[in-house]
């Protein structure tokens, strides 16, 4: 059974297959409109979502599948009565052909997949992983630069709790000549296990203290929101805000990415800059998720 659980599961070859398929779908989505006729995709989100849930649902519909979904599953599904993820999956497997899950627990996707009754796609697991976001991030980088080898990225924001960052770094580490710079408040520093993972793959993680310390010819600046819902206490606001003035200190080839939602970390005055890629990035999520649904349902 094929699941999409973690960025760790992919080889470079598999990534290229997924990106090639997503690219083909993006060029001609109509050609795929009946691929999943008769299939039902369950979409169980126990945490808030806009893009991931709606792009997965749109992906299913554009492929001819139907969706069943419970918004705010934590409150409106039987989880509120104490049902385990495993029991929920055993039941839903009787209705649906695949299930997308987002949950506050870091191990939720693995728990869902352990039932092994239908393909599970991890739509975000606590502060652990968000592999489908990382896939669309890399797809966007490949689309812009024509390759992923040689990407020089700065990650900003909440590197401690940000699952999109964790999944992105895992995927990037599969490529050659990757450079990674981190710029965040100390309280949101990247966990050591990701620094060690990068090091084991010969990537040095360079901690920076200000925008001035970042190379000006980065390929990607990847900002993220402080994940206030994932910790107790008040660690203050984001200090490294990207506005037009800051962005203009970087190369005209540097792209600015963000998984969204944005709060204050990117000023709206950069939205019209050709380097602002976050809305394009979110749009690419549709094609990558279409490719992933085809893949787990053996239609790729
Ligand atoms: C992210 C998430 O849910 O982890 N959003 C998304 O899926 N695009 C980022 C976030 O919530 O900050």
Image (spheres, rainbow, N blue to C red):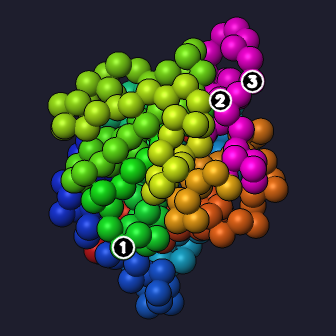
- Would you say residue 211 is visible in this rendering? yes
Q: Do labels 2 and 1 touch, CB within 8 Å?
A: no
| Residue holding disc 3 | 237
Give the side of residue 50 with respect to residue 221, left or right: right
Mark 3 falls on what kind of element?
loop
Give the answer, above or below, for where 195 lies relative to 168.
above
Q: Residues within 10 Å of mark 1 (few under 14, many from 20)?
A: few
Tell me the number on the disc at residue 146: 1
Name the residue at the right extreme. 269
Query: Which residue occupies 27% across, 44% down?
Result: 173
Query: Which residue occupies 60% across, 21% down?
Result: 185
Give the answer, above or below, for where 127 lies relative to 265.
above
Ligand 1, by image quadrant, is top right
Give the answer, above or below, for where 39 lies relative to 27.
above
- Would you say residue 80 is visible in this rendering? no
Give the answer, above or below, for where 67 lies relative to 7.
below
Q: CA distance from mark 1 to mark 3?
A: 36 Å
Viewer-side label of 2, 1: 1
Q: How far across and how far down the image is residue 245, in percent?
A: 75, 50
Mark 2 falls on what kind of element?
loop
Residue 236 in magenta? Answer: yes
Q: Residues within 10 Å of mark 3 (few under 14, many from 20)?
A: some
Residue 182 in magenta? Answer: no
Q: CA distance from mark 2 to mark 3?
A: 8 Å
Q: How far across and how far down the image is residue 18, in percent?
A: 31, 67
Tell me the number on the disc at residue 226: 2
The magenta segment:
224-247
Q: Do labels 2 and 3 touch, CB within 8 Å?
A: yes
């Amino acid at each position: 059974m094929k699941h999409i659980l973690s960025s760790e599961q992919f080889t470079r070859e598999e990534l290229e297959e997924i990106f090639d398929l997503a690219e083909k779908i993006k060029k001609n989505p109509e050609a795929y409109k009946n691929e999943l006729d008769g299939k039902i995709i369950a979409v169980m989100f126990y945490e808030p979502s806009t893009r991931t849930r709606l792009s997965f649902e749109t992906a299913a519909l554009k492929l001819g599948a139907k969706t069943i979904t419970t918004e705010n599953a934590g409150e409106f599904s039987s989880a509120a009565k104490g049902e385990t993820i495993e029991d929920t999956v055993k039941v839903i497997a009787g209705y649906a052909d695949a299930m997308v899950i987002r949950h506050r627990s870091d191990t939720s996707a693995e728990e869902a997949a352990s039932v092994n009754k239908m393909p599970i796609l991890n739509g975000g697991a606590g502060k652990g992983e968000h592999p489908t976001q990382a896939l669309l991030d890399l797809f966007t980088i490949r689309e812009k630069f024509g390759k992923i080898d040689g990407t020089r990225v700065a990650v900003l924001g909440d590197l401690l709790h940000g699952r999109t960052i964790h999944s992105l770094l895992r995927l990037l580490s599969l490529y050659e000549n990757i450079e990674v710079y981190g710029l965040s408040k100390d309280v949101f520093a990247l966990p050591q296990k990701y620094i060690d993972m990068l090091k084991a793959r010969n990537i040095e993680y360079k901690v920076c203290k200000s925008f001035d310390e970042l190379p000006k010819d980065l390929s990607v600046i990847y900002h993220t929101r402080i994940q206030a819902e994932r910790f107790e206490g008040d660690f203050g606001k984001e200090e490294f805000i990207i506005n037009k003035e800051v962005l203009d200190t970087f190369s005209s080839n540097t792209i600015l990415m963000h998984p969204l939602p944005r709060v204050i970390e990117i000023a709206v005055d950069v939205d019209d800059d050709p380097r602002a890629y976050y809305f394009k990035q979110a749009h690419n999520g549709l094609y990558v998720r279409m490719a992933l649904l085809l893949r787990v349902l053996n239609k790729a």
